[in-house]
Image (cartoon, helix red, strand yellow):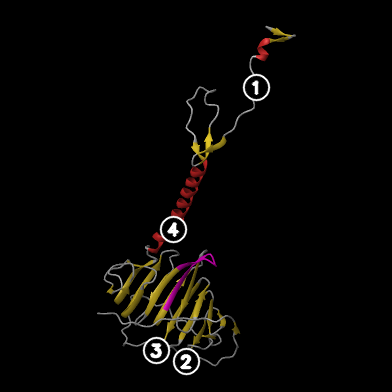
Amino acid sequence: MRQGNRPSYLYRFRVRPPRVLHARPGPGGALLSLPGSRLLGLPSLPTLPILPTLLGLLSLLALLAFLAFSAPAAAAADEPIGKIVKFVGQIWVRSQVHPPTGEWVLVKDKDHPLYAGDDIRSGRGRAEILFRRDEGILRVLENTQLTLREAPEPNRQVTLRRIFLVLGRVWAQIAPRRGLATQFESNAAIAGLRGTTIEYWVDANGDTWVLCTEGSVEVTAAGVTITLAVGQATRVTPGQPPLAPFSLPAAPPPTVEELVVLEEKVITPPGVPAVTVAPTPLSPVTGGGGIVSPSR
């Protein structure tokens, strides 16, 4: 059949605008309808409740996000931050992660794992520690006690490694690494490193000594900060600002093999020249800690 001058087949099919998914009221909230299945010869799909479905998807996404962020943090707490790669003489470790937890253990084998929060103490012995994140080296000399701490700093977007020295002497070589900051602490001072080789010790009187042999070191105490260049040192008495930098010849780096048998006390460092430069006042610093003798 023709209508006018047009073929009739032009009127046989009508072009309709595409239909989209729409919602209609139903029990439990709006229902998701999938129109057009009959036109395509497909079986009708069941209607889905929109509100419960969306809430379920959002809950699932929130759970996955929580697991993605919390699982690595929990795993990192159980991972070692370093290990004792070399030692001689008497070295004890007290860990809250490595069994037996909370007890002083005499190190008997190299590659002994170290975790954040571990306490380390040497008697007539020395140890070399290799840090995992940056392969930094820390050498612990005789009659020394320290605590290793490492945790993220959200405000600074870095991981802060803190080496708290209670008593004794350490030598360290720490290379710069993005996202990782290292500082040495005691009851008297904090020393922040900038890719540095440093000697840091606390003598029997409680004074803290810092010697920079490579790079630079910022030493802060009692609201005062000074910067040490290569070959410079300072001494800090608890509650007092650091002395102005002075020159102190550096001895060769201590080695673990060269064990020095000492009495149960720390050798007093050399004398200090008079202060000639007033340091610049900055923010105050606090510290804490106390020595504990391991059970033998």
CB under 8 Å between discs 3 and 1 = no
Magenta stretch, overall SS: strand
Q: Position of residue 202 (x, y in %)?
A: 42, 84
Find out whether the residues at labels 4 and 3 contact each other: C-beta distance under 8 Å.
no
Q: Earlier in the sequence, mark 2 or mark 1?
A: 1
Work out which quarter of the rendered image holds the N terminus and state it.
top right
Q: Secondary structure at mark 3?
A: loop
Residue matched to label 4: 70
Question: Mark 4 or 1 closer to N-term?
Answer: 1
Instruction: Characterize the local packing of mark 3: few (<14), some (14-19) or many (20 or more) Cα atoms within 10 angstroms.
Output: few
| Residue 76 percent location from the top left of the image | 41, 61
* Type of amino acid under label 2: Gly
**Residue 126 figure quarter:** bottom left
Q: Is 70 located above or below residue 206 in the figure?
A: above
Q: Is residue 63 magenta?
A: no
Tell me the mark number nearer the camera, choosing from 2 and 1: 1
Q: Nearer the viewer, residue 279 or 245?
A: 279
Q: Residue at label 2?
A: 271
State the separation of the CA atoms marked 2 and 4. 51 Å
State how far apart marks 3 and 1 are (Cα).
95 Å
Name which residue type carries label 4. Answer: Ser
Q: Mark 3 or mark 1: which comes first in sequence?
A: 1
Q: Pointer 3: what residue?
A: 204
The Cα atoms of the two marked residues, 3 and 2, are separated by 14 Å
Q: Is residue 283 above or below residue 68?
A: below
Q: Nearer the viewer, residue 97 or 193?
A: 97
For the residues marked 2 and 1, what is the alpha-carbon distance in whole angstroms? 99 Å
Where are the magenta residues, as a range?
Answer: 151-164
Left or right: where 202 falls relative to 233 = left
Q: Which residue position is annotated with label 1?
A: 15
